[in-house]
Amino acid sequence: MLGDVLLITEKHQKAGEIIIEKILSKRKPKMIIGISGESGSGKSELAHVISKGLRKHSIFAKPLHIDNYYRILPLLRTEWRKQHGIENVVGYGEYDWDTLYRNVQEFKDGKVSTGPCVDLVTEQVDQLTTDYSTVDMLVIDGLYAIKTEGVDLRIFIELTYHETKKAQVVRGKEPQNDYRMAVLEKEHQMVQALKPMADVLIGMDYEVRMVKG
């Protein structure tokens, strides 16, 4: 996402190093990594650290942010959610999974791909073109990233929105009003339901635990 603010700290770097070792042990052609967690938990920071760290191993990995794939445009989303009911619409169905899967397949096929990219300054959706012919891995991050079909390593950050309020404010998320808190609570329920799918868990202090494989 254009204009996103990353708060990369030592804890992200240390967790990223451990995960990179895991990735190298499971490396395969056109490998896909998924990172899920609640708002402000550090998904984008971890995706950045992992992708950049893999360059030291001559692996080109590209982060792909699922928040770019909302079906409802940013400027319309708040009113749309209120109109249809937060409990009814917040969740998996808000995303354009068809476009996401098309872009993932283009990565696998090594093609030139065009997909959405949200500009957080203008709140408009641009189109970003990527040549996947030289990209070795895809690092997908987002609330429901590990739900994506075909992911080879699923990482889940256990921090909840209760612990990440400061990060949400600093990164310019929506103001902490009743509407935003209702959205975060619904997302909390949806994201936590994905935890059993994880291969790797990132704890409250960003300690890394392997739970599968």
Image (cartoon, rainbow, N blue to C red):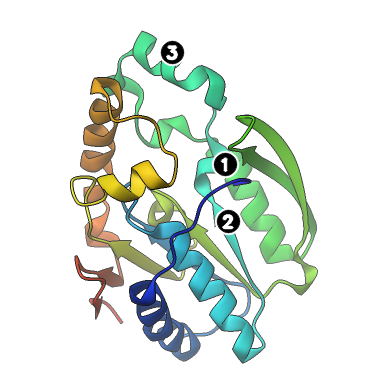
Q: How many marks?
A: 3
Sequence-earlier tag: 2 or 3: 2
* Residue 136, x across and y down, in percent: 66, 75
Per the image, the residue denoted by label 2 is 64
Q: Are marks 1 and 3 in contact (CB under 8 Å)?
A: no
**Res 109 seen here:** yes
Find the distance from the CA under tag 1 to the CA under tag 3.
18 Å
Decide if residue 53 is on the left or right side of residue 181: right
Decide if residue 118 is on the left or right side of residue 168: right
Q: What's the amino acid at mark 3?
A: Glu
Find the distance from the CA under tag 1 to the CA under tag 2.
8 Å
Give the quadrant of residue 118: top right
Q: Nearer the viewer, residue 101 or 15?
A: 15
* Viewport quadrant of the C terminus: bottom left
Q: Are marks 1 and 2 in contact (CB under 8 Å)?
A: yes
Using the image, determine if residue 174 lies above or below residue 30.
above
Disc number placed over residue 68 in the picture, else none = 1
Badge 3: how crowded within 10 Å, few (<14), some, or many (20+)?
A: few
